[in-house]
Image (spheres, grey):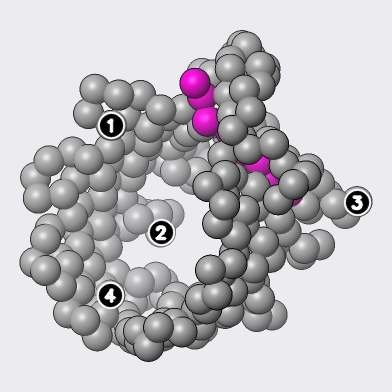
Amino acid sequence: MAEYEFGKRIYKQVLVDGKKMGKWVVLKEVEEFDENEYKIHHIFGDGREIWLENDAKGNPVHEIHNDGSEKWKEYDSEGLIVSLKDSSGFSETYKYQYDSDGKAIHKKASNGMESWIERDENGNAIHVKVVTELQEEIEIFNEYNEKNKRCHEKYIKDGSVIHEDFLEYNYEGRLVHKKRILKDKEVNFWLEFENHENGKIAKNFCYCGL
């Protein structure tokens, strides 16, 4: 972690509504990727670290955390998690129902949690309804841009809006700015990238506005 200056105030040129402007920011997270662009390391400014092992499709099947804990995941042919367990003894399984295009439209966990997914004509999830094992109800509404990139998300819990996210992408289709509205508070995040020689992402830096 020593090579990254988490928490240090930095003045950077960032993208806001398609325009470059100067903002004071701090580095919050760094993700590192292999040459296939599979994530292998995630570092947080609060000291947490996660190392990931992936299967041939890039699905993270094993996580090692710097607090000594571990997680293991198994996936179906669509890349959806069907089994999760960790070193504390926690274990959970998931079952899915799919539409005619092979997209998941219903998920049920062994703990009783269920979710229902409504999709648009492009297969994008535009509405997700979740009923947790505690019978809490969560709804997520998504909007997508002309390139099928999610550009707006509204997260509602028990009828109250918890947050809204507005997402902005660069010309390569990479997420570069996320504005989160939390009730009457606005929080902004900006992402920058370093690439491998093959053009794949090597590192992803997430900055938070001050």
The quarter of the picture where residue 90 lies is bottom left
Q: Nearer the viewer, residue 135 or 197?
A: 135
- Identify the mark at residue 107; answer none if there is no mark: 4
Residue type indicated by callout 2 = Gly
CB atoms of marks 3 and 2 within 8 Å: no
- Identify the mark at residue 13; answer none if there is no mark: none
Residue type indicated by callout 3 = Glu
Few, some or many residues within 10 Å of mark 1 (<14, 14–19, 20+): few
Q: Is residue 88 above or below residue 33?
A: below
Q: Earlier in the sequence, mark 4 or mark 2?
A: 4
Tell which tag, 4 or 2, sits nearer the viewer. Answer: 4
Q: Could you tell me residue 27's position as x and y percent? A: 61, 35
Secondary structure of the residue carrying tag 1 is strand
Q: Could you tell me residue 41's position as x and y percent? A: 67, 61
Residue at the (70%, 50%) spot, across then down: 1
Q: Nearer the viewer, residue 31 or 197?
A: 31
Q: Earlier in the sequence, mark 3 or mark 2?
A: 2
Tell which tag, 3 or 2, sits nearer the viewer. Answer: 3
Q: Which residue is under mark 3? A: 197
Q: CA distance from mark 1 to mark 3?
A: 39 Å
Q: Which residue is under mark 1? A: 182
Residue at the (20%, 74%) spot, across then down: 113
Q: CA distance from mark 3 to mark 2?
A: 33 Å
Few, some or many residues within 10 Å of mark 2 (<14, 14–19, 20+): some
The quarter of the picture where residue 132 lies is bottom left
Secondary structure of the residue carrying tag 3 is loop
The quarter of the picture where residue 29 lies is top right
Q: CA distance from mark 3 to mark 4?
A: 39 Å
Q: Nearer the viewer, residue 193 or 25?
A: 25
Magenta part of the protein: which range?
203-210
Residue type indicated by callout 4 = Lys
Q: Which residue is under mark 2? A: 123
